[in-house]
Image (cartoon, grey):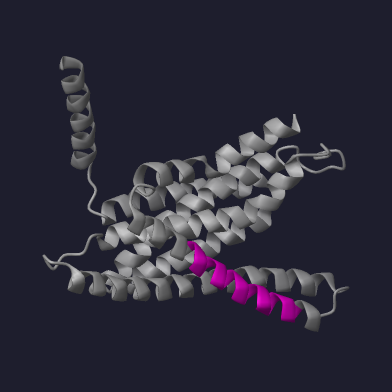
Amino acid sequence: MTVAVFFGCTFIAFGPAFALFVFTIARDPLRVIILIAGAFFWLLSLLMSSLVWFIAMKASNNEDYQLQRGLLIFGVMFSVILQEVFRFAYYKLLRKAMEGLVALSEDDSSPISVQQMAYVAGLGYGIMSGAFSMINILADSLGPGTVGIHGESQYYFLTSAFMTMAITLLHTFWGVLFFDGCEKRKWWMIAVVVCLHLLVSGLTFLNPVYEGSLPPAYIITVAMGVWAFLSSGGSLESIRNSFTCSKSSVNSQVGS
């Protein structure tokens, strides 16, 4: 049973991200590099926030429960801010890299658009964030099977997997919106991304009352997905055309 829980939660948490990687990134070496670099920038933000957290814990009284809870909230909020700072730094780096690619190109065009870079970088952020938030939970899910015996929720692994999936997708959508805001100098878009990142991270403090954390997180995920799709130039007509093209290609293959 523990093995089934492990694989089930793994597929829930990382299945969508893995599918996006396989179908939209894996065949393009440049996109793979951008994704890995995005994951590296997220790791840098984690390193900096972990250092601050370590210093704060060493300088505080470990027996003061209220103080420790306050430090935990501060640590999460500080980590979110730092992640967005590094996202902006990564945007600036990619913008410089794009200028170099255009200069080296024979037709003065970049091999990748800003929207594509934002999507790939955001997915790299999300995959690394999801991996660090879920890897220890998955290790515990292999056994022994003690979840729920001492009053914990029996849905702990399942809800953690769904929350990880939401966070991974949100980072992808936030990356698209953040880069779009930087490109168009719409700073309010960046502010919305940061505020929603803080909100979703704050929702995890409601656990184990999962009814208060998961539904709002998924409502925000759907809203961000629609907004990112529209900001990238998507429309109902483009969705209709994609289905029309896929159907026509299938019909041509059948006819041949």
**Vertical side of 152 occupied by 56: above or below:** below
Viewer-side residue, 229 vs 100: 100
Residue 85 is left or right of residue 11, and the answer is left
Placement of the C terminus among the 4 image quadrants: top left
Viewer-side residue, 237 vs 108: 108
Q: Where is residue 188 in the image (x, y as percent from the top left)?
A: 35, 71
Q: Position of residue 114 (x, y in %)?
A: 27, 63
**Vertical side of 192 occupied by 203: above or below:** above
The answer to whether residue 147 is visible is yes
Q: Which residue is most to the bottom?
A: 59
Viewer-side residue, 63 vs 179: 179
Query: Which residue is drawn at the image coordinates 58% and 48% (left, top)?
Result: 163
Q: Give the range drawn in magenta.
A: 39-56
Residue 10: quarter of image: top right
Q: Where is residue 67 in the image (x, y as percent from the top left)?
A: 78, 75
**Does residue 49 belong to the magenta stretch?**
yes
Residue 181 is left or right of residue 172, and the answer is left
Placement of the N terminus among the 4 image quadrants: top right
**Does residue 53 belong to the magenta stretch?**
yes
Q: Which residue is most to the top?
A: 255
Q: Where is residue 175 in the image (x, y as percent from the top left)?
A: 40, 61
Query: Which residue is drawn at the image coordinates 38% and 69% (left, top)?
Result: 190
